[in-house]
Amino acid sequence: MPAPFVTLITDFGGHDPYVGIMKSRLQARLADVPIVDLTHAITPFRPEEAGFWLWRSAPQFPPGTVHVAVVDPGVGTARSLVAVRAARQLFVAPDNGLLGLVWQGSAPAEAVRVTSEALARLGLSATSATFHGRDLIAPLGAELAAGRCRFEELGPAVTPEPGRLKPAAERERVIDGVIAAIDRYGNLLSTVEASTLKTLRAPQITYKGRRFPMVNTYGEARNGTCVALVNSFGVLEIACSCGNAAETLEAEWGTPLQAVEGSMELNAGANQL
Amino acid sequence: MPAPFVTLITDFGGHDPYVGIMKSRLQARLADVPIVDLTHAITPFRPEEAGFWLWRSAPQFPPGTVHVAVVDPGVGTARSLVAVRAARQLFVAPDNGLLGLVWQGSAPAEAVRVTSEALARLGLSATSATFHGRDLIAPLGAELAAGRCRFEELGPAVTPEPGRLKPAAERERVIDGVIAAIDRYGNLLSTVEASTLKTLRAPQITYKGRRFPMVNTYGEARNGTCVALVNSFGVLEIACSCGNAAETLEAEWGTPLQAVEGSMELNAGANQL
Amino acid sequence: MPAPFVTLITDFGGHDPYVGIMKSRLQARLADVPIVDLTHAITPFRPEEAGFWLWRSAPQFPPGTVHVAVVDPGVGTARSLVAVRAARQLFVAPDNGLLGLVWQGSAPAEAVRVTSEALARLGLSATSATFHGRDLIAPLGAELAAGRCRFEELGPAVTPEPGRLKPAAERERVIDGVIAAIDRYGNLLSTVEASTLKTLRAPQITYKGRRFPMVNTYGEARNGTCVALVNSFGVLEIACSCGNAAETLEAEWGTPLQAVEGSMELNAGANQL
């Protein structure tokens, strides 16, 4: 049975034909599977950002979905390709940290290193040294989505490269996360999951030495004030109502934030980086 | 009979997976209806800009088309969802002014407030407080497009929120419009319709105290000079041939422009804001 | 037999509904042909940039593919539409230099000027003076892709306008090319084809008075250093590993670069513009 969806996420942008060429390779091998562009605006050279979005987006797709991810600064060098299976979905990407968060955050998950033999059996080889998304990763995703090859046949089990993002860590009455994506509106999306946040009573959020109250939705804050909320991707987010939190707070990708129980004294030192 | 097209217009941008996630909800409910992205680059917090483009784009689609529009700064608060039927097409959006111009400019038009009961009957409820485009508006558009629910069943008749844009007003020998969109090329699109403009003899266009001659197409102007013309969306537009009118004229969204009969003296004062 | 693919390339950007409206015209006439967006971010008023990408992208599509290209500053004036047939693919565009490189670089190629009579036979006429992409070029591409009209019936044979880009010129032990596109990563794509480059022994690349070594892939260079390579579109490219060559080298579109045999002395004067 073919996959219900194939998703794409890359750092190719919309400036050049790279996305279109890669999609045409998918479509040539997949008659009727809808292809969903998650985004092609991942920050170049930051595979973990793509991994964060995949981690949060995958649960919004049905079982059987195949995710194709290409942020690949090491293309053409010795880095491997890796495939992950979690929650009955498949992920294919360069093994450069992109799938580290999906792997760690989606237990139980399996991973295999994709061998050149497996690719050769599918008739795939790199015709370029600089565009394996087109030559290998998209066609491999299409073969998986079409049901013409099986995850187990791709290669030996591996532990994917972990990358620079980890699931938020819980310690007593504190959850330590990081800013894992900054969206179009300047909202700061963190690695702190809603399910983890529930373990705290009356949580408050601290970032860069400031404390933010929790609300339910953007409209609850006065215009221009920054608040924290659980967003539609199930993670903690800092947002400014009708404003741009990233600019207001001079936020940066990868910086730490904390959720603490409301009754705790804020340890200001905890946010010094 | 399913809709011939579903169109999407949002302020989500292309930076994040929001568009892809929303489209996947449409595709899951609509086997074979083509989805057309009008644009996802609407200025955040400016629903009327989306409404302007819908007003001008809808006549370019066949009867039965369903338009899904999401510019929704009030998501999760008390604002309603509204559906409009005009010229045998359907529009679904937050009731925040987005559909004001479609409603006023497409007489006869009907509108209903979408009740939570109607949504519940379709199995729809908000699983998040911040992404009703994904949770409610797109699935509702899909159900309408698939013919699985009827406009009349959505809720009671209402008058949509008017928003900040109105159809251009005619007074004797003068038409008062505003700049309703600034496009990629810096062209200034106004609310003045071609049909209204025809009521003036030898019209001339004034904007910010300057007068612009009417031409038929961009190439008729000398490079770098600004002219006025009726554009391919049927409204009056100010453009600079091989240049950027918005930059040249320091134009701003929502500012007034006028069409006057060529024989009239320009009342300079009329353009002072 | 319908075309396997229709591709689109324009300078419309993603800011406005122009792409969506044009695609809806294609889809209305093409039930099941996949439409591939090559890019809509061509620099406005630079048709040759679209032509360069078409020249390099077309060989990556199967025979029968129809390419629709719209960069059209002269829309509504006397400029013609032109169709080109090369390598069993078809291209339709304004005759403003856009297809010059495809024509010169894809011998043997045929070209015809599209007459208004041919358009009229297909039921096509310009309903606007400013959007022939929507009114004529896309529907014409759809008719060709659907097999409802034949290339030979479109009009008399012509030589397309050459435009500002030519295939790289070979002279003894030197190949003269130009920068024909600057991509999202700041990579500089040139008109020098891999096949031509092979005629030089140990080629070195010069640009703006600097010499760049040839490598096989980005990862072979130290971070931040600029190198030359044959890219995945089969042309010579200058790139900075984990950096932006366009910014580092202050590169500009249309400027010359040279490939020279490694044993030759670099004639610094050759690169003074």
Image: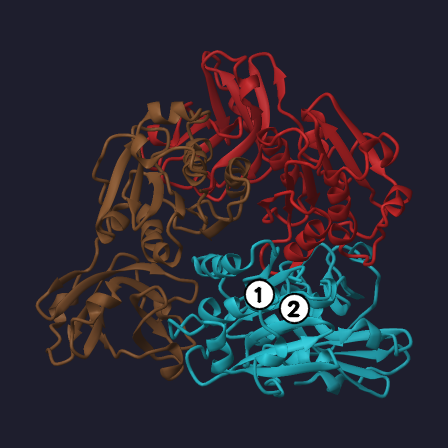
Chain colours: A cyan, B red, C brown
Q: Quadrant of the C terminus of chain B?
A: top right
Drawn side of residue B107 relative to residue C219, left or right: right
Q: Nearer the viewer, residue A143 or B84?
A: A143
Q: Position of residue C76 (x, y in %)?
A: 37, 29
Q: Is residue A147 above or below residue B132?
A: below
Q: Residue at x 10, y 78 (%)?
A: C265
Q: Quadrant of the N terminus of chain B?
A: top right
Q: Which residue is mark 1?
A: A9
The extreme left residue here reads C172
Q: Nearer the viewer, residue A143 or A210?
A: A143
Q: Residue at x 62, y 30 (%)?
A: B62
Of the two numbered discs 1 and 2 on the same chain, state the one appearing first in sequence.
1
Q: Nearer the viewer, residue A136 or C184?
A: A136
> Looking at the image, can residue A252 be seen?
no
Tag shown at residue C220:
none
Q: Position of residue C204 (x, y in %)?
A: 20, 76
Q: Residue at x 51, y 24 (%)?
A: B268
Q: Which residue is mark 2?
A: A53
Drawn side of residue B243 relative to residue A104, left or right: left
